[in-house]
Amino acid sequence: MDIYMPMSTTRRHNKILNEFVSKRDNLNKSDNIDIFTSDCALAHWGSKIKSNDICKLVDIDLIEDTEYFKKIVINQLEYVQPDYMLFEKNKQIVNEFETITAGFPDLVIEIWSDSNTKAEKEFKFNLYSSGSTCEHWYITQDSNHVECFLGQNQLKEQNLTNILITNDGIKFDLRRIAIGI
């Protein structure tokens, strides 16, 4: 498995992302977990340019010829680059260059900065919400607040001052970088 080092916009953004990445050592003890960070793209159907198109993550269960999809189709799809994504239970297909992943991640994390526009935030929320098994978290880099969703359903809010826990029980301890502690 390759771990891609992130490129980020600010020092705080980098600090938060590096904390998630550093937790990979604990997670990688399980052969079931694949982790990707900023440089790996997440493929999706639909165009983010045309406002009337609905963009959706790729449902791997609907792909009949995975080898063809891996070699040809996945490279032609549009993509986003989440700050962090984790696959554990949900299936994925990675293109032959290992740069684009398709499927519903078990967890997607976005760390918002001032440079993220409202349209970009809405687009990514709607995209990640298109998979009912995709848990997605949003962290504003200048706060400790973590907004959490599973598909379109909002989950209990979390805070960097506590251990963060996914819906499936995966824990991330980022308390050492919480603001004001």
Image: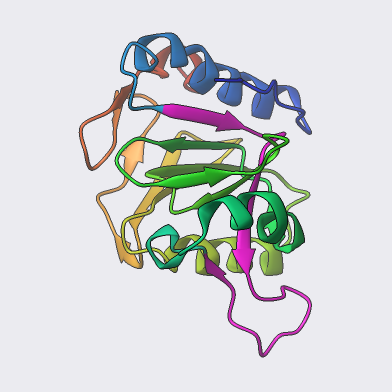
Question: Is 47 located above or below residue 151 in the figure?
Answer: below
Question: Does residue 91 appear to the left or right of 125 in the view shown?
Answer: left
Q: Judge whether residue 138 can be spotted in this image.
A: no
Question: Is 38 located above or below residue 28 in the figure?
Answer: below
Q: Residue at x 47, y 21 (%)?
A: 178
Residue 1 position by quadrant: top right
Question: Is 50 located above or below residue 44 in the figure?
Answer: below
Question: Does residue 94 appear to the left or right of 171 in the view shown?
Answer: right
Does residue 160 belong to the magenta stretch?
no
Magenta residues (range) = 34-57
Q: Which residue is drawn at 72% across and 62% down?
A: 78
Picture coordinates of residue 75, whole percent (x, y): 74, 54
Residue 4 position by quadrant: top right
Picture coordinates of residue 25, whole percent (x, y): 43, 9
Camera-side residue of 66 and 8: 66
Q: Judge whether residue 92 can be spotted in this image.
A: yes
Picture coordinates of residue 50, whole percent (x, y): 76, 84
Q: Residue at x 34, y 35 (%)?
A: 88
Picture coordinates of residue 83, whole percent (x, y): 61, 38
Quadrant of the image for the C terminus? top left
Question: Does residue 85 appear to the left or right of 78 in the view shown?
Answer: left
Q: Which residue is drawn at 25% across and 50% down?
A: 156
Question: Is 41 located above or below residue 116 in the figure?
Answer: above
Camera-side residue of 35 and 137: 35
Does residue 43 belong to the magenta stretch?
yes
